Image (spheres, grey):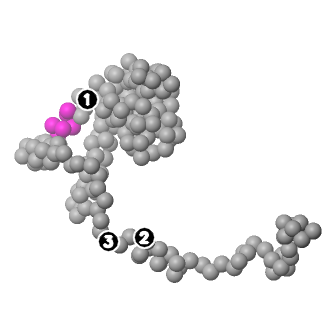
Amino acid sequence: MNNPYLIVGLLEAFEWFDESLQLSLRDLGWPQLTRPESMVMMHVQMDIVRPTDIARSLRLTRQAVHHTIASLVDRGVFELVDDPDDGRIRIVQLTAMGTAMRGDAQKIVDRLTSILTTRIGKANMAKLRAALDQEWGAPVVAGVGTGPSRTFAALLLKSAPKRSRAPNRSSSQRDAPTKRAQKNVK
C-alpha cells in the first residue's frame, strides 16, 4: 500500500477488510458472497434498505441491485417485505439466517480490527479512526482546469476516422433518389 494516491490506499484497505471478512465467513461455513453482495449487505447494515436507495448509493443500476438482492433472497440471507412507510415499495430485511451471518460478521470485523491494530500499531489505528471519523462534507468538484471539452475532445477530433457521407451505400445508391424523395416529386 505504497501509492501516492489516497484513493488507491483507501480502496486497498477496504479490499483487505472485505476479502478477510469473506474468507473468515466462508471458513465458518457461510455462503460465499460476491463483492456487490457484500456491498449490499453493508448498506442494509447501515439501514439503507430500499433497493433504489442502495442502487443510488452504490451508483449502480436498479436492475443490478435487484439482481444482487434476488441472489441473496434465493440463498436465504434476505427477504423482501412491504415498506411500513409505503406499501407500494418492498424493502430488504435480513432473515434469521442473515441475522446470524451478520452476528458472525460483526465478530469477525472486531477481530480483524484487532489484527490490523497489531499490524499497524495502536497510535496509527487511533489516527486512522480519527481521520475517518471526521466530517468530510459533501462531495466537491475539484476544479482542476482543463477537461475533455478542451483536451480530450481535441484529441478525439484529430484521431477520428474520416467518414464519407453514406459509408454503407455505393455511389450509384447515393445518387439514386430515395423513396421519400420520389414520393414527394409525384
What residue is shown with label 2?
A: 148
Residue 164 relative to residue 45: left or right? right
What element does badge 1 sit on?
Answer: helix
Amino acid bearing label 2: Pro
Q: Quadrant of the C terminus?
A: bottom right
- Picture coordinates of residue 65, whole percent (x, y): 47, 38
Say which residue appears at 20% left-offset and 33% top-offset: 110
Say which residue appears at 18% left-offset and 38% top-offset: 113
Residue 184 falls in which quadrant of the image? Answer: bottom right
- Picture coordinates of residue 28, whole percent (x, y): 33, 28
> In the rendered image, is residue 25 in sight?
no
Q: Nearer the viewer, residue 45 or 120?
A: 45
What residue is shown with label 1?
A: 106
What element does badge 2 sit on?
Answer: loop
Based on the picture, tell me whether residue 45 belongs to the magenta stretch.
no
Q: Nearer the viewer, residue 40 or 106?
A: 40
Real-space Cα separation, disc 1 to disc 3, in angstroms = 44 Å
Q: Nearer the viewer, residue 185 or 38?
A: 185
Say which residue appears at 27% left-offset and 49% top-offset: 138
Q: Which residues are magenta?
A: 110-115
Q: For the residue carrying disc 3, how many other residues have a C-alpha within 10 Å: few (<14), some (14-19), or many (20+)?
A: few
